[in-house]
Every structure is written in C-alpha cells, then in structure tokens.
Image (cartoon, grey):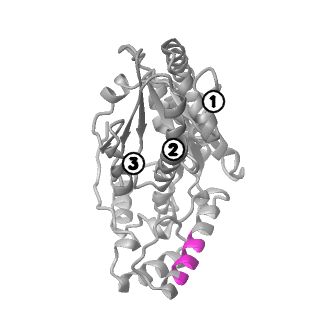
Amino acid sequence: VFATYAFVDRPPIPADLPRREVLRHLLFHARHGLPLMDVSYYSSQLVAAARDLVAAHGIDLVEVDHLQMAFVRRFLPEIPAILVNHNLESELHPFWMTDRWSLPELVVWRAFAELSRRNARAIELANRWGFSAKLFISPLDAAKVDDSCPKYHLPVPMAPEPRRAPFHRDRLDLLWVGGFDWPPNLEGMRWFLAEVWPRILSRSEVPVRLRIVGGSPPDELVAHAADDRIEVLGYVEDLAPLRATADVLVAPLLSGSGVRVKTVEALAAGLPVVATPKGVEGLAVVPGRDLLVADTPDAFAAAVADLADPERRVALSRAGTAYVAEHHDPARVAEIKAEAIEAVLDRRCR
C-alpha cells in the first residue's frame, strides 16, 4: 500500500535517440559518472519528482531497485538509501548495439560503453555513491561486492502452490518461458534448439512437444513452429495454465547474472525443471533432488528424456515446492528487508 506515488515516463535509450542527441546523452552520463549509458533510465524529471516526495512527506530512506535507478542516490546524496541488486549489471556485456551507425561511430560508442561498465563496477562493487546498505537476490552476487556497506541476501519471495493437474503419462510436454528482448534468453534458446532438441527427440521413448513462451520472438524462432512438435506462443499474460499442464520447464541459459526468477516460479508451481548451471545460479537447490542440472547438450537431453517416467516428475515436483517453502518464504524475505531498513535508520540516529 502506497501513501502516494508519482509516475515518470522512461526516457529513450541511445539506440532510440536521433543521432544528434546520442553524443549529448553520452557526455552527460560520463560527466556524472552514471552507469549503463547504453540502457540508462536517467531522468531529470524523475529526480525532481523524488526530491518533491522526500520534501513533502519527510521520507527517511530511499529504496532503489536495480542499478538502472541508482542515479537517484547520485542526485539525492543527503538521504540514506539502499540498493536492491537483481543482477550485477557490470558483469553483463553491453547488448544495445545498433547497425545504423558507421564504423567510426561504433568505435566511439564502444569506448563509452566500456566507461559505463567501469562506472557500474564502481557503484555496484565498490559503492562509489555511498549506499547505506545493499540487498542481493543472489548470494553469489553479494559475495563479489566489497564490504564498504552492509550486505544482505534477499531471496525472491515466492509461495509454493503444489501441482494439482496430473502429469502426462504418454508424452512429455516441455515449456520455455523468457522474453527474447533479453539476449541471454535468445542465446539459450538458440543453443537448445540447435544442440539439445535433436538429441531429446532421438533419446525420448515418448513423444515430446515444446512450447516456447516469451515476448518478441525473432523470425528465426517463429520459423521453428513449422515443426508440429514446436509451438511458439510469444508473450502470454497468464502463465499459470501453461505451468499447470506442462511436464518440464527447460532453462538452458548460458550467460546472465542474478537469479532466474522463472526457475523459482516453476519450482513453486510444482513443475520439474531441467537447467544448465547458469539456470540455477544463486539458488540453494540440490541438483538431482530439487531439479536436474546439465551442462552439455548430451547431458541435458538425457536429463529431459529420463523424465519420461511420470513418477520421477512427481518426486521432483514435491521436492521443488518443498525447496521454495524453505528458501523463499515471503514472510522471511519481508523480515530480512525490515532488518536492513531498521539497521540503516538506527545508524542514522546515532
């Protein structure tokens, strides 16, 4: 429940700006040490709105979600702030390139992109802007950050909902969930379709179908729907019915940072998961008990094929919901955040 709120439109990123505005954008970000110049959410209107809210309501602390919003701390340094890190953005490659620029322009762009990543590392890893505390959804990310301020592991809050629909006994329905405007998702699905899918088909003793769910699927993925065993659905508002009728969620991720929330959501729904190590990074799961983990095409295909046994799926379903109940309890997550906030405010009062 919010006492008040203010909405501000997200500004365009450089790839969407007229050429004449791009250099101005980059120079401003360089001057102020702002990170993520290629995907920056910086907005002077948002900073002004935040200042107005702080002044009008006597705000004691600012919570900033994602490094993309960390600029609020840069321009409101007088009030304590905590940063909630969903990823370590400084570890991610600058994806937002464009083919509309000439080679000299791209050279300049890459130089600014590297500067923006250095700024990101200074803020995320070394606390250049003096956040009072940092919260991480991945303990692996927290371990990479220095001790210049208190750190907390804040798991993704999730309530388990044990599966009610029976698993198929005469076939295996696979599900992928993830938007394709995020490059690691596209990378993972390309690898799965090229390297893993053919091996699954050759190994499985029952018919296998694949549903690919996620916004902005490129033409190369849509073309796979010509295979009647593959369905490309695009963006789907309500995923619950798809999880309830699928037999296995596949998470073939090869890169990225943070925690794969879709993996946690599947476990919470009692949907067995087969993932790469990246697909379970930052989770306290036990491979083989809570889900299956494989790091090669052959091993991934073998893990999926082994789940043709519905009893194996039932066991993983129960283990997955038990894991979520133990490690992602929303009440405990709320307590952790409250502890962090109280500690920051207590230090301010001393």
Under mark 3, the amino acid is: Gly
Distance in Å between CA atoms under marks 2 and 3 = 15 Å
State yes or no: residue 110 in magenta.
yes
Q: Are marks 1 and 2 in contact (CB under 8 Å)?
A: no
Q: Classify residue 18 as left or right of residue 68.
A: left
Dot in front, 3 or 1? 3
Residue 29 position in % (x across, y down): 49, 75
The residue depicted at 43 percent of the width and 73 percent of the height is 98
Tell me if mark 1 has few (under 14), some (14-19) or many (20+) residues whose alpha carbon lies within 10 angstroms of its own.
Answer: few
The residue depicted at 61 percent of the width and 57 percent of the height is 91
Q: Are marks 2 and 3 in contact (CB under 8 Å)?
A: no
The residue depicted at 58 percent of the width and 54 percent of the height is 131
Residue underneath mark 1: 284
Residue 250 position in % (x across, y down): 49, 35
173 above or below 281? above
182 above or below 337? below
State yes or no: residue 21 in magenta.
no
Q: Which mark is residue 179?
A: 3
Residue 282 position in % (x across, y down): 61, 38
Tell me if mark 2 has few (under 14), some (14-19) or many (20+) residues whose alpha carbon lies within 10 angstroms of its own.
Answer: many
Residue 158 visible to the viewer: no
Q: Classify residue 169 as left or right of residue 78.
A: left
Tell me if mark 3 has few (under 14), some (14-19) or many (20+) residues whose alpha carbon lies within 10 angstroms of its own.
Answer: some
Q: Which mark is residue 106?
A: none
Task: Tell me which numbered mark, 2 or 3, is placed earlier along the sequence.
Answer: 3
Q: Which mark is residue 192?
A: 2
Task: Tell me which numbered mark, 1 or 2, is placed earlier along the sequence.
Answer: 2
Q: Range of the magenta residues?
A: 107-116
Distance in Å between CA atoms under marks 3 and 1 = 25 Å
The dominant secondary structure in magenta is: helix
